[in-house]
Amino acid sequence: MFDWDGTLMDSAAAITESLQAACRDLDLPVPSEERARYVIGLGLNDAMSHILPGLAPARHQEVVARYRVHFLKHDPDTGLFPGAAETVAGLHEAGFLLAVATGKSRRGLERALAATGLKPYFHATRCADEGHSKPHPGMLLGLMEELGVVSDRTLMIGDTTHDLEMARAAGVASLGAAYGAHAREALLEHGPLACVEDIGSLRAWLLHHA
């Protein structure tokens, strides 16, 4: 089970800058880079509640709409981490069941899968707007049920503490991607099997241990 942003897609900076720009557009308090990076992986409404705790929920969609405008501007400059496409294709060819559990919307994920050419390699996907947001285990539980796999044969790979908390809540092992949104030290606090520093190390770890 892969997270998307910050794990396969090198998009943490684009998300952070887009959140900050959206707040500026609406004359709202602009979150620090650290605070904005913390919410990467959450569903957009949950992210709004964290970075703008005093904002009425009825206004969340205003911020989300401005965020999407800015994020789409980053699209031409945002791509997969080097080696990510080859890693996913290689794991698929080796016979692994692959899935995505992401804080992106369904529309956003489908756009990203089409743009990167990775859609054929994933057997199932779940998005934050289809149920509970991370760190609730709902996405992982749904994916395991759909794919017919048990928790002790499942691995969640993600770059945020939200990913690792979700894995723990679902009774699933996790692997931290320390090259994404959250620091290695924060990831280690949530008990991953290991933390890897780049896609090459991720692929090597999976080929050796999976």
Image (cartoon, grey):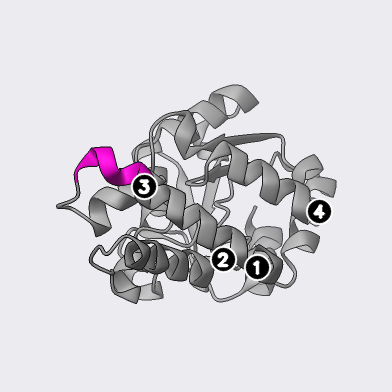
The mark closer to the camera, 1 or 3, is 3
Q: Which residues are magenta?
A: 56-61
Q: Are marks 1 and 3 in contact (CB under 8 Å)?
A: no
Q: Say if residue 189 shows up in the picture.
A: yes
Q: Are marks 2 and 4 in contact (CB under 8 Å)?
A: no
Examine the residues drawn in magenta and state their main secondary structure. Answer: helix
| Residue bearing mark 1 | 78
For residue 11, which numbered disc appears in the image?
A: 2
Circle 4 residue: 89
Alpha carbon separation for disc pair 3 and 4: 38 Å
Q: Earlier in the sequence, mark 1 or mark 4?
A: 1
Sequence order check, earlier mark of 3 and 4: 3
As drawn, the label of residue 47 is none
Instruction: State the image coordinates of residue 31 (x, y, percent, origin top left).
Output: 28, 69
Instruction: Report if residue 168 is visible in the image.
Output: no
Could you tell me which residue is drawn at 64 percent across and 27 percent down? 147
Q: Earlier in the sequence, mark 2 or mark 4?
A: 2
Asked if the residue at tag 2 contacts the one at tag 1, i.e. Cβ–Cβ closer than 8 Å, the answer is yes
Of the numbered discs 3 and 2, the one sitting upstream in the chain is: 2
Most distant residue in the right direction: 93
Quadrant in the rendering for residue 40:
bottom left
Rounded to the nearest angstrom, the CA distance separating label 3 from label 2 is 22 Å
- The residue carrying pointer 3 sits among few (fewer than 14), some (14 to 19) or many (20 or more) residues within 10 Å by Cα, namely few
Residue located 18% across and 53% down the image: 53
Marks 3 and 2 close (CB-CB < 8 Å): no
Mark nearer the N terminus (1 vs 2): 2
Residue type, mark 2 in image: Ser
Compared across the picture, whether 100 is left or right of 46 comes to right
Judged from the image, the secondary structure of the residue bearing numbered disc 1 is loop
